[in-house]
Amino acid sequence: MRVAVIGAGSWGTALALVLAEAGHEVMLWARTAEVARAINAEHRNPRYLSDYRLPSAICATADYAEAADGAEAVVIVTPSAALRSVARDLAALIAPYTPVVICSKGVEEQTGLLPIDTFAAELGNADRLAVLSGPTHAEEVICRKPSAAVVASSSETTALFFRDLFATRFFRTYTSDDPVGVELCAAFKNVIAIAVGISYGMGFGDNTAALLITRGLAEMSRMVVAAGGEALTCMGLGGAGDMVVTCMSQHSRNRRFGEQYVARGLTLDDFTAQTHMVVEGAIACKTLRTLEERYGVELPLTRKEFDLLRILLEHKGRVLTREQLLERVWGVSFVGETRTVDMHVKTLRKKLAAAAPGSEEAIGTVRGVGYRMREIAL
């Protein structure tokens, strides 16, 4: 099968290798002609994962039309900030029913839309869209180390299609019908990874990291449920799995940004200039605030981290002391849980008032709200 992979960063390069190993013909789109030429001539990506030779089944181009020509599936692996422009550029180049899987993580800043919603708005036919996420660092996938991800779509047919498309002896995907939950988890875990990195950079230990991860999962689950996703998604590969590996792995750019840059008073611009990589968590701090306000969900860790990054941007070179960091992070109150309980109680009263006593609707409402209130205690 001919597959177009849009984005030749580290993750795009690793996924291109997975697809080639699965027996597919891969056309990898790179942002510059220089990178495309190097991949074709030397079978290596000169900018990302350059130590690894790529299979001959991978060809590269810097032209969207050439990448999309004859593609039977499209894999999107570009930074989240570029997703809408990429979708617009591809809209006229791919067939209306060509399956598209989005492997980028984040929330659109202006609209608060998730990547799959952005593509649905530009391409139409949402049933052919899916998202892929999970604890899958490119540095290990490129080495063919056993890894697994989740592929989520509103269409079971589409989810199964991409499950089989990526199947190799070292890479497996599991299907889900909760793209909303998977995408919110993908954005959220990057934010918490920065916080964990900052804590290590300031000299705190594993106890602090465990605290941040656990409370981050609580915030994640509240947002996922409020946005219409499933709480159990947060316990799967795309949730807890990706959270743990992103917060604790040496390969995590988000943790590295927090540990080696923010904790030393450096900014996102410093990181980008030195690594040529995008820190999605730094962007998600801001975009998740949009969803926090929309759904009325308290995200104290996200809010504090956003404030911290903003301060460092305004006062470049300023290094926070341990006491200042504790004041900002430890001072987070988790009143969001109380407010969320109050919100569910009000919802319960309203729905029960409209339902007949003892009816299935009334019983279902009580159970549903009970489950949500229980999730808050996670």
Image (tube, grey):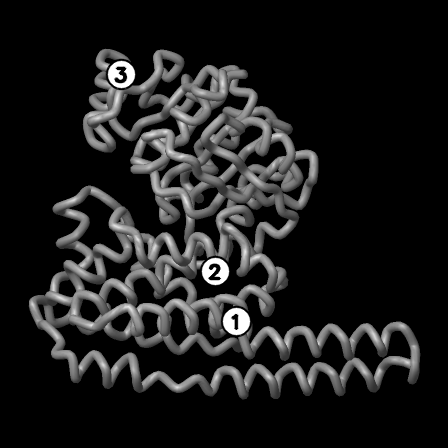
Label 3 or label 2, whichever lies nearer to me, is 3
Callout 1 secondary element: helix
Expressed as whole percent of the image width and height from the top left, the position of residue 200 reads 21, 66
Could you say whether the residue bearing mark 2 is in a helix, strand or loop? loop
Figure quadrant of residue 82: top left
Residue that label 1 marks: 294
Look at label 1 and name its amino acid. Arg
Which residue is more in the foreground, 196 or 365? 196
Q: Position of residue 287 (x, y in %)?
A: 40, 62
Q: Badge 3: few (under 14), some or many (20 or more) residues near its Cα, within 10 Å?
A: many
Residue placed at 63% from the left, 79% from the top?
A: 373
Residue 300 versus residue 97 in the image, above or below: below
Q: Quadrant of the N terminus?
A: top right
Residue occupying image coordinates x 54% and y 41%: 122
Q: Residues within 10 Å of mark 2 (few under 14, many from 20)?
A: some
**Residue mark closest to the camera, 1 vs 3:** 3
Give the distance between the C-alpha atoms of the residues marked 1 and 3, in whole angstroms. 46 Å
Q: Which residue is mark 2?
A: 112
Label 1 environment density (alpha carbons within 10 Å; few <14, some 14–19, many ≥20): few
Per the model, the C-alpha gap separating discs 3 and 2 is 38 Å
Q: Nearer the viewer, residue 166 or 312?
A: 166
Q: Position of residue 283 (x, y in %)?
A: 33, 58
- Image marks 1 and 3: residues in contact by CB distance under 8 Å: no
Mark 1 vs mark 2, CA separation in Å = 9 Å
Q: Secondary structure at mark 3?
A: loop
Q: Residue at x 47, y 37 (%)?
A: 88
**Which tag, 1 or 2, sits closer to the chain's start?**
2
Q: Position of residue 145 (x, y in %)?
A: 38, 34
In this figure, which residue is indicated by the disc labeled 3?
43
In this rendered view, identify the residue nearer to me: 305 or 33: 305
Find residue 356 and report its image quarter.
bottom right
Q: Are marks 1 and 2 in contact (CB under 8 Å)?
A: yes
